């Protein structure tokens, strides 16, 4: 057998799943193979550490607020999605009306037909700049994982 097959036997030996013949075969191999002996020691250490490890079960107080917190987050997320969708719809309609009734109307003064798009473009540039800066700052925020 190759060492790969013996390494599989090592885990079976540690878990107590090998037959007598497999144990003898593994022990004979371990006498001549330093790498497999080292792996056996490492697995024994790992097994000992996992045997003494235990999981902490959260208290009932934790579970009482857990689901309500999830529902609150889902409700807020849905609320923001609906508000954002409504605002996009309203702004798109207002922009269409503005373009068709005011900006493309030759009877409107030129300063209105030029001033409104310049104001809108400037506002969009500022909004994008602030959003980009906030996203960048959030990535490098040192205290974002700190709980209050």
Image (spheres, rainbow, N blue to C red):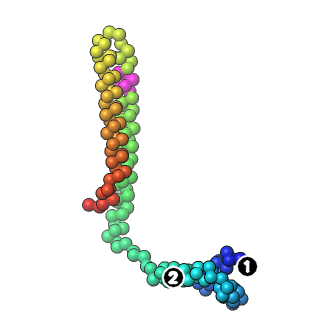
Instruction: Name the main secondary structure of what is drawn in magenta.
Output: helix
Whole-percent x, y for residue 107 in the image: 32, 9
Q: For label 2, count other residues whose C-alpha is less than 10 Å away and answer few (under 14), some (14-19) or many (20+).
A: few
Q: Nearer the viewer, residue 117 or 107?
A: 117
| Rendered residue at 54%/80% (across/down) | 42
Side of 70 relative to 115 (left or right): right
Whole-percent x, y for residue 88 in the image: 38, 34
| Residue 44 visible in this rendered orientation of the protein | yes
Whole-percent x, y for residue 125 in the image: 34, 32
| Rendered residue at 32%/70% (across/down) | 61
Where disc 1 sits, the SS reads loop
Q: Is residue 96 above or below residue 37?
A: above
Q: Is residue 88 above or below residue 73?
A: above
Is residue 44 found inside the magenta-colored segment of the image? no
Where the N terminus falls, by quadrant? bottom right
| Rendered residue at 31%/21% (across/down) | 116
Instruction: For the residues labelled 1 and 2, say whether their Cβ atoms are less than 8 Å apart.
Output: no
How many discs mark residues in the rendered view?
2
Where the C terminus falls, by quadrant? bottom left
Please give the residue where the numbered disc 2 appears in the rendered image. 45
Q: Is residue 137 above or below residue 144?
A: above
Q: Nearer the viewer, residue 77 or 4?
A: 4
Please give the label number shown on residue 1: 1
What are the residue bounds of the magenta stretch?
Answer: 93-98
| Rendered residue at 30%/60% (across/down) | 146
For marks 1 and 2, give the CA distance: 25 Å
Where disc 2 sits, the SS reads helix
**Farthest residue, direction left:** 148
Q: Nearer the viewer, residue 125 or 17?
A: 125
């Amino acid at each position: 057998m190759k060492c790969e097959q013996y390494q599989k036997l090592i885990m079976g030996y540690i878990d107590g799943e090998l037959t007598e013949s497999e144990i003898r075969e593994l022990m004979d191999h371990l006498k001549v193979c330093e790498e497999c002996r080292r792996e056996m020691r490492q697995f024994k250490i790992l097994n000992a550490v996992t045997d003494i490890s235990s999981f902490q079960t959260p208290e009932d107080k934790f579970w009482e607020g857990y689901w309500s917190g999830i529902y609150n987050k889902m409700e807020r997320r849905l609320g923001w999605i609906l508000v954002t969708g409504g605002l996009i719809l309203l702004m798109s309609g207002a922009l269409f009306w503005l373009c068709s009734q005011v900006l493309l109307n030759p009877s409107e003064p030129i300063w209105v037909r030029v001033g409104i798009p310049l104001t809108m473009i400037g506002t969009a540039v500022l909004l994008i700049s602030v959003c980009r800066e906030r996203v960048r700052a959030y990535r490098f925020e040192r205290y974002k994982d700190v709980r209050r």
